[in-house]
Image (cartoon, coloured by chain):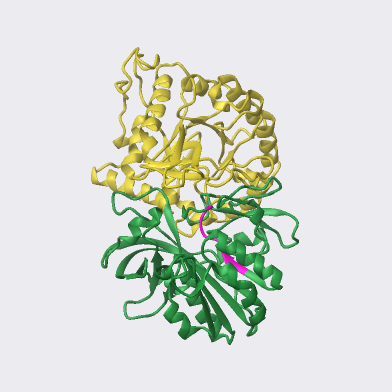
Chain colours: A yellow, B green
Amino acid sequence: MVDLSVSLAGHRLSNPVMTASGCAGHGRELNRFLDVAALGAMVTASVTAEPRAGSDAPRMLETPAGLVADTGLSNPGVAALLRDLPWLHSVGATVIVSIAGSTSAEYARVADQLRSSDDFARVMGLEVNLSVPNASAAGRSFDDDPLSAATVVGRVRERLPRRTALFAKLAVDARDLVEVAAACLEAGAHGLTLGNGPRGMTIHVDSPTHRPVSVVGRASGAAVRPMAVLAVQRVHQAMLAGRMSPAPIIGVGGVTSGRDALELLRAGATAVQVGSATFADPRAPARVRDDLARLLDSWGCASLGDALPTVVQSAAVPAGRSDPAAGRAPMTNDH
Amino acid sequence: MTVPGDSAATQVIRRSRVAQESSEVIAARTVGAFRHLTLVAPGVAESAGPGQLVAVAVGGPGAELPLRRLVLLHRATPSGAYGGTVELVIDPADPTTAWLAARRPHDQIDVVGPLGRRFPLPSEALPCVVVGEGAGGGALLWLAEVLRTRGCRVDLVLGGESARRLLGVVDARRLCDGVTVTTLDGSAGVHGEPADVLPTLLERSRAAVVYAAGPLSLLRATAAAAERAGAVSMVAVNGPGGSVAGCGTGVCAGCVVPVRDEGGGVTHLVRSCTEGPVLRGDRVRWDALVDGRWRIPSDARSVAPHQGE
């Protein structure tokens, strides 16, 4: 059996497949269908300082190969998450906590509350969800601007113990993605999660015209996987080219199979998250992991690294066209 | 007969035995305007009760749609010639479940269930009124049967747009103490809708409990009629505001319904797939139902992804 273990920001994970924030609750729901402790990590749904009721119905609509969703950061608040941590620890889950806020001060407050809990000591890491409207910037997302993103990351970083891994989660359609990613790493993030789905809209044509039903939100599912692959590849190439410090990337977007996971890993990700596929199949994260293992076994790989390129060529984005990083000399991909 | 508060959500998840199985369709027939499917699903059938849901993957191998369809169980039979089976009734006119309506015997369907909470039963033999409309109302015959075995008097109201959209009238006459039929076009029974006959029926039957399943407008009218008559109402709220697509397992937070807590003051959001679908009618914030969809009340406090204890 192939060894799927990976090293991520100083932590050893049994495999590279995690849940994605917002698609797995706090773990209990999915643990009825799979063993959350046997996943690479369990990433909990984003919590804010106080509970939030969130958006009106409908909160999500299907697209031909995915979803458009906006829950309005519907969440029970950081205090509710802290009440669930002992259970997550009791089943042996490797936990990454996702946090969000409307201001950098709110992110800091959430980090403070987490740090002050004894149960937080066993949490592997924090994922800072930056694809959230910034109340101080007319609702533009934090990840649309390097300074806003770095401010949040910096304020959260200074509140966390050193051993707590910190990941900045950015949207694949973030303006200046590479610059924002670099700013987050400079502000103290250990790694990046790429990423939240692009903005999108879908209009339900089955509803009567006088009562239109639509959702404006983030697109997800298989339809957005090429965007996630490109986002991971662009940022990874920028790291190889020395335009930002090398750091692990967690790839997320439209992963429904082991092959999909491998695609993101080959683009430069160290780990992958399974998101909305979990809505269609509650076993999806475990199935993706097992599928990946079977695929690599069939190729005779002893470890995950055997299936990954040692050098990533920058062919996916031709030099000088859309990404100034892509034309630089590729270097070793240190998986 | 109480709806547990938020803290009970976690207990529900811990207690519930949920199965995911690839189920073979062993029978598919047309009943009036509807399709009636019987699936071999022993894991689901084993612990299912009236009012519970299944989440069904639709689209077929290689073309699965991103969200499951949440369907109220028509009936579950834990032991039978084929092992445990579950029955679903699908409206072919509903585009969200068109794929399901087209299934044939020997097709495979991935089913997760049973989900959510069943209709609570009275601890004594009290008179009950059961109100159903459309495909969703079909689950109520099963409930009526269970109530009758507990010695409850059961008056059933079946509503539909036309006689073709009435489900189970013949069985109902055999199973229940009284049956009232309503149709919007007057093709059978009373010309009108269930809400038109409820006040008189509630008064005459002295019902202590009213159960309902069907469109949100029916549930709302039932809750109001029950309140006026001093009866408890239990309604099966299925689907996020007119749609019935979601994860079914409680992780997507798409199906939330605003519900007042036991004290009657604070409004919380509950997931119809997990804390629901059966809710106390007098606790549901019907004032937040606009154009058939839930608006989140500005005073709603907390949210779905399950609460700690």
**B128 shown above or below A307:** below
Q: Give percent across and percent down for residue B210.
A: 61, 73
Q: Residue furthest left?
A: A299
- Whether residue B49 is visible, yes or no, is no
Residue B72 vs residue B198: left or right? left
Residue A334 vs residue A59: left or right? left
Residue B184 vs residue B2: left or right? left
Q: Give percent across and percent down for residue A6.
A: 42, 39
Q: Which residues are magenta?
A: B234-241
Residue at image location 58% in from the left, 61% down from the top: B275
Residue at image location 44% in from the left, 77% down from the top: B169
Residue B270 part of the magenta segment: no
| Viewer-closest of A29 and A164 | A29
The rendered magenta stretch, by its main secondary structure, is classed as loop
| Viewer-closest of B251 and B180 | B180
Q: Give percent across and percent down for residue A297.
A: 27, 46
- The number of numbered badges drawn on the structure is 0
Q: Quadrant of the N terminus of chain B?
A: bottom right
Q: Quadrant of the C terminus of chain B?
A: bottom right
Q: Give percent across and percent down for residue B10.
A: 60, 59
| Viewer-closest of B133 and B237 | B133
Residue A143 vs residue A306: left or right? right
| Viewer-closest of A188 and B166 | B166
